[in-house]
Amino acid sequence: MILFCAKAKRLRSKTGPFSFHLFKALIIWAGVLATCSCFPPAAPGDAKKPLGSGLLLPRDDAWLGADGAISVPLAENLRLWLFGDTWLRHQDGTLKLVSNSVGIQEGECSDAFEPHWGQAATAAFGSTEPKGSWLWPAGGVLLQEGIFLVFHHMERRGPGPWDFAVLGSQLVSIADARAPPCSWHVRSKRLPWTAEDFLPACSPVIQGGHVLLFGTRSLGAQRGLFLARLKKRFFAELELETGWEFWGGEKGWSVFLKEAQPLLEGVGTEVTVASDPRGQGWICVYSPGGISSQILLHRAPAPQGPWGKPQNLFTCPEAAYQSLYCYGAKFHPGCSSLGLWVTYSVNSKDGLFPGPDTARPRWLLLPHP
C-alpha cells in the first residue's frame, strides 16, 4: 500500500477511460434488482427540503469527480476525504478513471479541498497485489496513534464485466496523517475476513476501550448490517487476527461470526453509523439496497440497537432522469451542528463520464428529523 502525490501537470499518459466504474455500476445494479422489493418502505412524508446544498469542489480542475465521499476528521476544521472511483483529466483533454483518490480540506465541509492522486494518473492508494487488483475505500478513524483507513481489496478475474471479486478488506495505518500526503508513512494489514464474510460498510467508531466496526453480509436476496468490535489497543497496533467479537442479539457478544445477528436488513454496501451530535442516541444513514432515489435514516439508543423504522430523509431529484442513478448516501456528524450534513453520489448508467456537475458528490444540510 503506497500513497503517491501528483498534480494535473504530471498527467502525461493517454490512457483511455478506466473500466472499473462500469464494473462497479453493474454489480451494484445486480444487487438492486435482487433487493428492490425486500427492504421496508419509508414514509414518503418524512422527507424535508434541505437547509443548504451544493457540490464537493476541488482546488484542482483536473479532478473531475468521484464517488465514495468519506470524511475523516484530522483536527478542528481539518479533514481527510476518501473517494472511490475518480475521474481525472489529462492536459490534452483525455479522461481516465482510477479506483481511489483523497482530498485534504481546511475550513467548512462545503469548502474546496486539495485533491491528491498517484503519479501518472494512478490511484492514491495502490494494491501491492499483482496487476488487476485495486482498492476501494470504506471508512477511516483518527486515534492517538494516527489515522486508520479501511479499504476493500478487489480483483479482476477475467475480461468480462462480471469477472471480478471482493477478496477481503485491509486496514491502513498512517502515523503522520497531518503531514503532507507525499510524506506519509503507510502500514497495512489484512482484516481477518475474506470476500463477503464480513464487509466493512463505514468508518470505525470508538466506544470506550473498543473500536466498533459495522459491516454487511449477504442475507439471501438482500444485505444485512452487522456489528463487530475489537479492543482499541489491538486495533491501533494492527493486531487483527484474533480478539474480535460480534453482536449476537439477545445472546450479547460472541467470538463467533456465525452467531452474529443483523441490526438492519435491506442496506447497501455503504452505510454511515454515528452517534447523534445532539446526544440523542445513534443514527444510521444509507441508500437502501445500494442504489436508490431515497436516503433513509434509522435511530437507536445504542450502536447494537434496537434500531427503529426507517425515515425518508431526502429524495434525490437526479433519479428522475432515466440515464442517471443515485447511491452511496452518508452522514457526516462533524460537519454541522445545525442539522444532518449528508452526501450522496450520482452517476451515469452507461458507465461513461457524466460530466463534472454530475460526477462530483452532492452535499445536503437537512433538518433534524
Image (cartoon, rainbow, N blue to C red):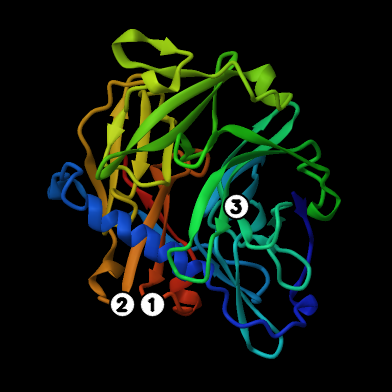
Q: Which residue is mark 2?
A: 323
Work out how far the residue at label 1 is from the one at label 2, CA to CA, in angstroms: 8 Å
Sequence-wise, which precedes: disc 1 or disc 2? 2
Q: Secondary structure at mark 1?
A: loop
Query: Which three-letter amino acid code belongs to the residue tagged 2?
Result: Ser
In the displayed structure image, the side of residue 334 where residue 39 appears, left or right: left
Q: Which residue is mark 3?
A: 82
Judge whether 311 appears above or below 62 on screen.
above
Q: Which residue is mark 1?
A: 350
Q: Secondary structure at mark 3?
A: strand
Query: Which three-letter amino acid code belongs to the residue tagged 1?
Result: Asp
Residues at discs 1 and 2 in contact (Cβ within 8 Å):
yes
Sequence-wise, which precedes: disc 1 or disc 3? 3
Depth order, front residue of 261/338: 261
Depth order, front residue of 20/178: 20
Say if residue 238 shows up in the picture.
Answer: yes
Q: In the rendered view of the protein, which quadrant contains the C terminus?
A: top left
The residue under the point 23% across, 28% down is 308
Judge whether 286 appears above or below 6 on screen.
above
In the displayed structure image, the side of residue 358 where residue 189 appears, left or right: right
Instruction: Count residues near mark 1 (Cα–Cα under 10 Å), then give few for <14, some for 14-19, many for 20+.
Output: few
Say if residue 49 shows up in the picture.
Answer: no
Work out how far the residue at label 2 is from the one at label 3, CA to CA, in angstroms: 26 Å
